[in-house]
Image (cartoon, rainbow, N blue to C red):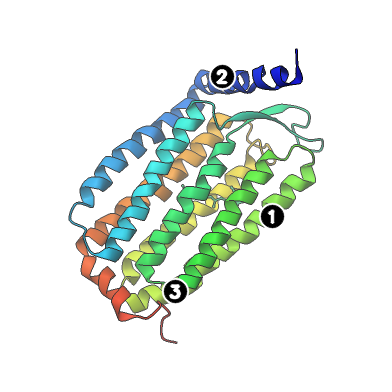
Amino acid sequence: MSTLDAVTTVPLQTTQSDAAAAVASDLLLSSSLWVNIALAGLSILLFVYMGRGVDASRPKLIWAATLFVPLVSLASYAALVAGLTVGFTEMPAGHPLGGQEVLSQWGRYLTWTLSTPMILLALGLLADVDTADLFTVVVADIGMCVTGLAAALITSSYGMRWFFYGVSCAFFLVVLYAILVEWPRDAAAAGTDEIFGTLRTLTVVLWLGYPVIWALGVEGLALVQSVGLTSWGYSLLDIGAKYLFAFLLLRWVASNQSTVAEGAAGTTGGDAAP
Ligand code: RET
């Protein structure tokens, strides 16, 4: 057999089927994924319906960004169920499960790089923040997700897993600072502070849950060794941080289009007066 044969005929397929079979055989795990597939599908239909009267430019942009959240989610969860973005990862020495293979849902971290920027874009547009601020926060958020993915996939060193976890947390702090300290001022100037306040609380509280689950689950300290349980943790957070968040935002934007459009027209770049 040539080297090429060996490369082309071997395993990817088997590994993927193995992963899909492992997911399907764990009722707790697979139900946590299918629930989100169903909710994402329903959300897409509902949000398309809710956006039917939205026609001003900025409200429409918020609506489009928000609609992408369940669209990405549907694809993300379907890829997990298919075994495409799930895999067995051997934990390095020093990890509580060192030398053993654990089922990693690494696709979650990958698809967050697409869905979380959409959430922040929608929030930033609602608060009418400065373009440079928005850019910085979105880049920090993508940094958070990519380094979180790295933390999950590193198999060579336990220390490096936590190093990347720490870097991801540092990026997360940038996002939290913007949402908690800077953006509320812009939202007040744009007249969207009430709904912004609600969405900010929802976002901050729920987003804080993700690094906690990571740290407790098999990828971190392995204090919770059931992948089904941690998966349900992420899935429940997703339901609030994505579908509930998007619903509240769209409902408000649909009935306050002029406030959103005026906020944009009334300021030159979003920065609130000092
Ligand atoms: C990780 C682990 C590394 C440290 C930190 C994390 C934060 C993740 C967050 C995810 C939010 C996801 C959402 C998805 C919606 O589609 C990557 C778990 C800080 C905050 C809201």
Q: In the rendered structure, which amino acid carries the disc numbered 3?
A: Asp
Q: CA distance from mark 1 to mark 3?
A: 28 Å
Q: Is residue 240 left or right of residue 247?
A: right
Disc 1 residue crowd, few under 14, some 14–19, many 20+, Cα 10 Å: some
Tell me what residue is drawn at x 36 percent, y 62 percent: 198
Distance, label 2 to label 1, CA atoms, is 33 Å
Give the farthest residue toward the bottom. Answer: 274
Please report the residue visible at 74 percent of the width from the left and 33 percent of the height from the top: 91
- The secondary element bearing badge 1 is classed as helix
Q: Which residue is mark 1?
A: 166
**Amino acid type of the residue that numbered disc 1 sits on in the rendered structure:** Gly
Side of 28 relative to 193 (left or right) = right
> Nearer the observer, disc 2 or disc 1?
2
Q: Which mark is residue 17?
A: 2
Asked whether the beta carbons under mark 2 and mark 3 sit within 8 Å of each other, the answer is no
> CB at mark 3 closer than 8 A to ligand 1?
no
Quadrant of the image occupied by residue 106: top right
Residue 180 appears in the figure = no
Location of residue 95 in the rendering, given as x and y in whole percent from the top left corner: 76, 37
**The one of 228 and 141 positioned closer to us in this rendering:** 141
Tell which circle, 2 or 1, labels the residue nearer the N-terminal end: 2
Q: Residue at x 61, y 43 (%)?
A: 214
Q: Nearer the viewer, residue 121 or 11?
A: 11
